[in-house]
Amino acid sequence: MLRLSPTAINSFLWCHKQYWYRYIEKQPMITNASMGRGLYVHSMIEAYLKGESIDVPLPAIQQWDDKDYEWVMDTAQDILDIIKTMYIPVKFTELELSRPLNRNIEIVGKIDLILKNNIIVDFKVLEEMKDTRNPLQLSMYQFLFPEGQGWEYWHFTTQTYKVLSYLREEIESVDWRKVVDDIIKEVDFEKRKNKRWCKKYCSYYNLCIKGGANDLHSKGS
């Protein structure tokens, strides 16, 4: 059975080849300091909301140095200080769910937070405040958690936070099932054409420019 998460579908939308490396070749992701910061802050917030120790392990980061370490730790503490000032009526945190889409496909996902009024919340850790909402992700979370009564992104920087909400019609208008069909039909898995984006954001950039172990997809080269 094929298991697809919002992360997998977003990976396919960003770059078909990125999806190929991560979910078909199952190549390990290379985590840089910026990605590591987001992972670490997520872990700290989740531990805090569960009432557990916030002394969580640091993620494995390639080329980790003292400057990166200081930056990640300071950022995490600043954002945790903001979280402590908020009233958060927690129902579930870090909730892992799965639900069959059909006989051959299962949708899986991990929701950062569900409030007591069944609002579905996703955290984003940003260097500067900007709108990075993803209705596809929250629409898939609604499929996994049908009791959801609202959808919010919580954006955090070291100075402030912002809550961005969705209307029901925005969530219900997202056709993520079509993307699932596209993944099933895909055969070429071409790489994204924007090399600047690839170098800055893709964990598989170096692997991609060299060609993967089983790379048969050269159209986008």
Image (cartoon, helix red, strand yellow):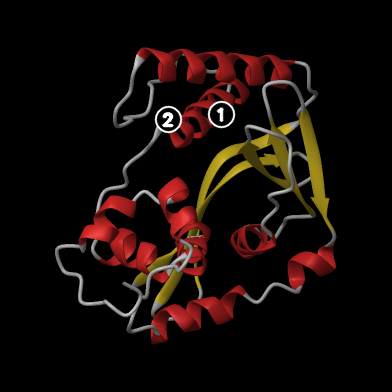
Whether residue 155 is situated above or below residue 85 in the rendered picture: below
Amino acid bearing label 1:
Glu
Looking at the image, which residue is at 78% across and 16% down? 85
Looking at the image, which residue is at 57% across and 81% down? 178
Foreground: 123 or 97?
A: 123
Which residue is the site of mark 1?
Answer: 46
Residue 102 position, x and y percent, is: 47, 80
Amino acid bearing label 2:
Ala
Is any atom of residue 26 visible in this view? Answer: no
Foreground: 163 or 116?
A: 163
Residue 32 position, x and y percent, is: 39, 35
At mark 2, the secondary structure is: helix
On the image, which quarter does residue 76 sit in? top right
Foreground: 19 or 180?
A: 19
**150 horizontally vs 100: left or right:** right
Foreground: 204 or 187?
A: 204
**37 horizontally vs 174: left or right:** left
**17 horizontally vs 131: left or right:** left
Which residue is the site of mark 2?
Answer: 33
At mark 1, the secondary structure is: helix
Q: Residue furthest bottom?
A: 185
